[in-house]
Image (cartoon, rainbow, N blue to C red):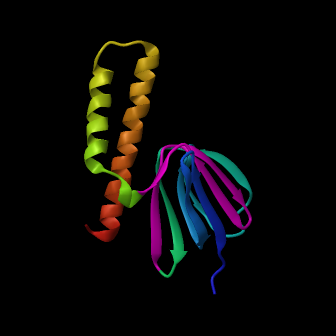
Amino acid sequence: MAMTMHVDIVSAEGAIHSGTAEMVYASAVMGELGIAPRHTQLITRLKPGDVRVDTGQGHIEHFYVSGGILEVQPHVVTILADTAVRARDLDEASALEAKRRAEEALEGKMAQYEHAKAQAELVEAIAQLHAIERLRKQYKV
């Protein structure tokens, strides 16, 4: 039997996932992380993007997080996300529309705050589209 760890993914709306896993993959601010059981303790910020939870026997669950904090203990991984959803629940049409709106906003003249907000919305929309694409490639949809 392979070693496992407990994984919790929680957002402001509530718990999204709680269970055991053999590996967890996430996009941290400093790069992509792969976390196995007994990983050294770590706390880092997450970028908008996908989180993959390998539950074993070739089954990987995909989630999208809009950012947040990842905490690693030897047998527990906790992700506290601003927003988290199962990747299969992402709406591609909405993400494409959000990307289009953010790109249009960036082309116009606006205050620095509005510009930063539009940039953040663009990054989030692109991350959602990448999560959808990665899910499509895995399942060849």
**Image: magenta residue range:** 58-86
In the image, residue 74 sits, relative to residue 111, either above or below, namely below
In the image, residue 121 sits, relative to residue 113, either above or below, namely below
The quadrant in which residue 41 appears is: bottom right
- Asked whether, in this view, residue 83 is left or right of residue 131, the answer is right
- Asked whether, in this view, residue 83 is left or right of residue 137, the answer is right
Q: Is 80 contained in the magenta span?
A: yes
Residue in the picture at 28% in, 20% down: 107
Q: Main secondary structure of the magenta part?
A: strand
Residue in the picture at 36% in, 51% down: 130
Taking the view exactly as shown, the residue that stands out farthest to the front is 13
- Asked whether, in this view, residue 130 is left or right of residue 50, the answer is left
Quadrant location of the N terminus? Answer: bottom right
Residue in the picture at 40% in, 33% down: 121
Q: Is 133 contained in the magenta span?
A: no
Q: Nearer the viewer, residue 20 or 43?
A: 20
The quadrant in which residue 103 appears is: top left
